[in-house]
Image (cartoon, rainbow, N blue to C red):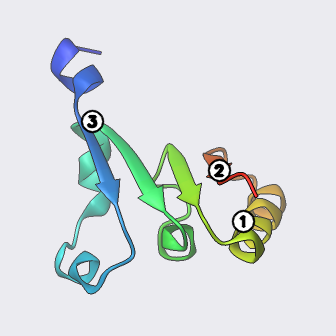
Amino acid sequence: KNKIFEETCFVIGNGESRLIWKDWNALKNIGTVYGCNAIVRDYPDLCKKIFVVNPPLYDEIVAGKEKNGITNRCIQRKR
């Protein structure tokens, strides 16, 4: 990978603005993609890491990863 790719990242939240972008997977060719909370419901293999604040959602994501073989890493806030 080149240096620009290694330094470029995208952080995708849960807001309505997420609906205006059509090709999220194209970002994976430009840099590293990080997501927040429930993005994994719509794009299960998009993000390299997912940041989760809600403990029940964290449990849901981890259970879904195990069931579906998803390889992204889920990071939870310490309680």
Q: Which residue is drawn at 55% across and 67% down?
A: 40
> Mark 2 to mark 3: distance in Å?
18 Å
State the residue position of label 2: 74
Three-letter amino acid code at the position of disc 2:
Cys
Q: Quadrant of the N terminus?
A: top left
* Mark with earlier residue (2, 3): 3
Q: Which-is-in-front pick, marks 2 and 3?
A: 2
State the residue position of label 3: 31
State the residue position of label 1: 58
The correct choice, above or below, for 32 with respect to 57 in the image is above
- How far across and down, in percent of the image, does residue 7 sit? 24, 24
Query: Label 3: how many residues lie within 10 Å, few (<14), some (14-19) or many (20+)?
Result: some
Q: Which residue is drawn at 21% across and 80% down?
A: 17
* Mark with earlier residue (2, 1): 1
Give the left or right position of residue 39, taking residue 13 as reference.
right
Which is nearer the eye, 12 or 24? 12
In this rendering, the count of numbered labels is: 3
Give the left or right position of residue 20, taking residue 28 as reference.
left
Whether residues under marks 2 and 1 lie with C-beta atoms below 8 angstroms apart, the answer is yes
- How far across and down, in percent of the image, does residue 48 sit? 50, 43
Is disc 2 placed on a helix, strand or loop? Answer: strand
Which is nearer the eye, 51 or 25? 51
Q: Residue at x 37, y 46 (%)?
A: 33
- How far across and down, in percent of the image, does residue 52 sit? 60, 61
Residue 38 occupies which quadrant of the picture? Answer: bottom right
Which labelled disc corresponds to residue 32? none
Query: Label 1: how many residues lie within 10 Å, few (<14), some (14-19) or many (20+)?
Result: many
